[in-house]
Amino acid sequence: MLSHLILGASSSLYLGDMLFIAISFIILMALIAKVAWNPVTKMMGDRADKIANDIDSAKKSRQEATDLAEQRREALSHSRSEASDIVAEAKQSGEKQRTTIVADAQNEATQYKQNARKDIEQERQDALKNVQSDVADISVQIASKIIKKQLDPEGQQALINSYIEGLGKHES
Amino acid sequence: MGDPVPTVKFLGLTFNIANDISILLTCIIVFLFVFLLSRHLALKPKGGQNVLEWLIEFTNGIVKGSIKGNDASRFGLYAFTLFLFIFVANQLGLFLHIQVGQYTYVKSPTADPIVTLTLSFMTVALAHAAGVQKKGLKGYLKDYTSPFLVFLPINIFEQFTDFLTLGLRLFGNIFAGEMLLSKVATLATDSGSWFSYVYSFPIEFLWQGFSVFIGSVQAFVFVTLTSVYISQKVSPEE
């Protein structure tokens, strides 16, 4: 069966077979290249690119996220200090307001006290005046009754006044 | 095996019809396999595409194992086609022997030395062509005198031994496998007793399994050696 292999017997070497194999193999290769090899390897290349891109973009997004977190932390600490500033300011203004209110109240109270004292003094003066005139009248009436003698109230006024004044001074 | 072969003469060339039919069948099976797996390609692969990509990665891995640098990608398609072709050709005869009259029309095409030597010749030719393309004719010829002039006959001789061993190794393995399969089959049918079927069935079964293994290994070895020979031609001188 292998006699066709003897190289010397070239007439029985199946040259046709060799050509047939070579050509059909090349056609098969071309068909595979068109149908499967090129699209599949292209797809594989695309996938490799996509994965590389995804890795890159993931790295970028992580960087962005870190930046954002850093910014947020900064903003947070900033707002915290701002808040404490506001609180301190409010405390200060409150303190100031308190002082003003207290001072105002004190002033007012002093004023009221003064007014009251003045009023009292006034009242007292008025009362004294009234009492003076009443006492003068009563004294005159008593004197007129006692003495049974018509005294002229106008004529005796100066004397009585001087007497009562002496009395007031003596009292105070 | 050992049967006469059907031949025709056409345009002064001799054709072995049995070989040609088997080769054509192998090509059709390989093409249909690849064609059906490559439908519905997507960026996110599933099903057939995964299998196909795994196969491509596998043969690319073989090629990249010996050819360094950018040259490897140029031979990926050749290695892929070669692997599938030899693999299917090796397995074809294990389950399919169509005999019409005195001729066996369908068998493993790689059980014929003409086929394997042609494949090996294609590989060697590709390797030499790639060598010339890569280094120029001068650099290519200079490789024969490396490491020094005394090696010239050895290097020339090596080209022929490479070519012959590559083809004959594949032929020997597959031919022996098929031969034994048909001998076991003859053992079952020729004794005339039904009992011979009982003991020859497991033997046939076992040997078929082993032949599948051998066929796969030989396809792998052929592609590996192909890439080694190509790398010898295209790799820069040390």
Image (spheres, coloured by chain):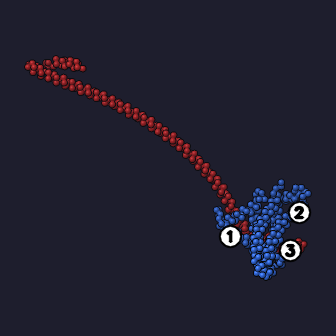
Q: Point out the tag, 2 or 1, that comes first from the N-terminus.
A: 1
On screen, residue B205 above or below A78: below
Q: Which residue is mark 2?
A: B157
Q: What is the spatial separation of the Cα atoms under label 3 and label 2, in whole angstroms?
A: 24 Å
Q: Which residue is mark 1?
A: B36
- Give the residue at x 59% y 47%: A67
Q: Residues within 10 Å of mark 3 (few under 14, many from 20)?
A: few
Q: Position of residue B133 (x, y in %)?
A: 81, 60
On screen, residue B152 above or below A154: below
Q: Quadrant of residue B200?
A: bottom right
Amino acid at pointer 1: Leu
- Give the residue at x 69% y 60%: A45
Q: What is the spatial separation of the Cα atoms under label 2 and label 1, in whole angstroms?
A: 44 Å
Q: Which residue is mark 3?
A: A2
Instruction: Pinpoint the chain carrying mark 3.
Output: A
Q: Quadrant of residue B126?
A: bottom right
Amino acid at pointer 2: Phe
Question: Do marks 1 and 3 both belong to one polypeptide chain?
Answer: no
**The C terminus of chain A - image quarter:** top left
Q: Residues within 10 Å of mark 2 (few under 14, many from 20)?
A: few
On screen, residue B134 above or below A68: below
Chain seen in blue: B
Locate residue A103 relative to residue B168 in the image: left or right. Answer: left
Chain seen in red: A
Between B150 and B96, the residue placed more toward the observer is: B96
Locate residue A112 relative to residue A43 in the image: left or right. Answer: left
Between B26 and B174, the residue placed more toward the observer is: B174
Amino acid at pointer 3: Leu
